[in-house]
Image (cartoon, rainbow, N blue to C red):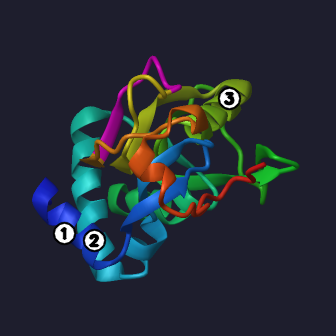
Amino acid sequence: MLSLKNSLAVLRKTNALLDGHFILSSGLHSPSYVQCAKLLSFPKKSEEFTKSLALKIKKNFNKIDLILSPAMGGVVIGYEIGRILNKETIFCERVNGNFELRRGFSIGKKKRILIVEDVITTGKSSLECAKLIKKSGGILLGFACLIDRSEKNSLKIKTKKIISQVKLKIPTYTKKKLPINLKKIPITKPGSRFLK
């Protein structure tokens, strides 16, 4: 398995881990941003991450029928994990702001489903995926991601554990509670969700 030290070195080398002042998709502010698309633009480097994550998933989940990922960030990760574990993999995508299954994808009743993402911060996208699973009569096994940067106070996932390749402790702040040093840095909005 890939160590934390080596994982962080690869993230920085590929510019997948950036420092500055960022507004995340959740609306929270952060001094660091993780952009897994940068890591994934180097297939050989990202292969180490996905193989390592797949081993952790195998240790934690006995039977997986289906992998579900949110578009866009989770699509490549979900596909790679599905390929390594030899599992059917589908994704959901936003239609008028809400996740839906399209392209003929479906979730069968009582199918055991693992949600796989690139990065989990608040877990909002994962919870939206979980609603699709519940609505279809599937069984949610849990959550997996390359990078878990969630914090207990902002994480919306309460009942299932998160399996990750890397757990990063990066603080997040509301606009009203920004530290002075962060206020001095120009804001970047790199997230995928529409921000007001």
Say if mark 1 contacts mark 2, CB within 8 Å: yes
The picture places residue 171, in percent across and down from the top left corner, at 37, 40
Q: Which residue is mark 1?
A: 9
Please name which of the two marks, 1 or 3, marks the residue nearer to the observer.
Answer: 1
Residue in the image at 36% along x and 82% along y: 42
Q: Within 10 Å of the Cα at label 2, are there few (<14), some (14-19), or many (20+) other Cα atoms?
A: some
Calculate the distance from the C-alpha at mark 2 to the C-alpha at mark 3.
Answer: 34 Å
Q: Horizontal placement of 158 versus 188: left or right?
A: left
Q: Amino acid at mark 2?
A: Arg
Quadrant of the image containing the N terminus = bottom left
Residue drawn at 39 percent across, 43 percent down: 144
139 lies above or below 26:
above
Whether residue 47 is visible to the viewer of this picture, yes or no, is no
Secondary structure found at label 3: helix
Q: Does the magenta portion include 45?
A: no
Q: Which residue: 39% across, 57% down?
A: 81
Q: Earlier in the sequence, mark 1 or mark 3?
A: 1
Q: Give me the C-alpha separation between circle 1 and circle 2.
A: 5 Å
| Residue found at the very far right of the displayed protein | 96
Residue denoted by label 3: 131
Mark 1 belongs to which amino acid? Ala
- Identify the element where label 1 is drawn: helix
The mark found on residue 12 in the picture is: 2
Q: In the rendered structure, which segment of residues is drawn in magenta?
A: 156-164
Residue 67: x percent and y percent?
50, 47
Give the quadrant of residue 61: top left
